[in-house]
Image (tube, helix red, strand yellow):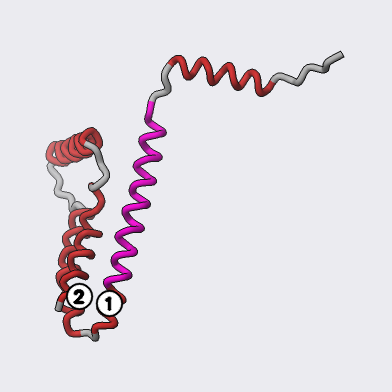
Amino acid sequence: MTLPIVLGLITMANVESNNWLMNATERAKLRRLEQEKAKRITEKGTRSIKLGKVVKTALRGLSVLRIIIASVTPGSIALYWVTSATFGLIQTYVMDWMDIRRKRLLTMPVPVSDQHNEGHRVKQQHQPARKRS
């Protein structure tokens, strides 16, 4: 009975892992964007279905359902599902880490002194080599 519960916890962790690597600034920006979107929707007076919330709720329900299904399957299948879910969680973590790292590097401002040095290095690289006589 341990494997099905572990499977459900790992599956739930995979569903909830999208905000683990965000810093406070990124969370505030995401919250602000959601508030602006909600404000636009209320101004228009229309209803909209938030697909992300529907999918996340469905995946939470499926992770609970997965516990029930894994409890009636043979232990080897449950073990396979646990290892598969663990590798999936690790893959999600690594991919999110790489994506957030890339985004932070792209949005990081370059100091003025580094810009000057970078331009100087580029000029040196493109100058033809001088011949010695």
* Image point (44%, 15%), residue name: 112
Position of the N terminus by quadrant: bottom left
Residue reaching furthest to the front: 133
Name the kind of residue labelled 2 in the image: Leu
Quadrant in the picture for residue 103: top left
Quadrant in the picture for residue 119: top right
Where 116 falls versus 6 (above or below)?
A: above
Mark with earlier residue (2, 1): 2
Where 16 falls versus 71 (above or below)?
A: above
Per the image, the residue denoted by label 2 is 3
Q: Residues within 10 Å of mark 2 (few under 14, many from 20)?
A: some
Residue 105 in the magenta stretch? The answer is yes
Whole-percent x, y for residue 37 in the image: 20, 39
* Image point (15%, 67%), residue name: 61
Q: Which residues are magenta?
A: 82-108
Per the image, the residue denoted by label 1 is 79
As drawn, is 122 to the left or to the right of 54? right
* Image point (82%, 17%), residue name: 131
Q: CA distance from mark 2 to mark 1?
A: 7 Å
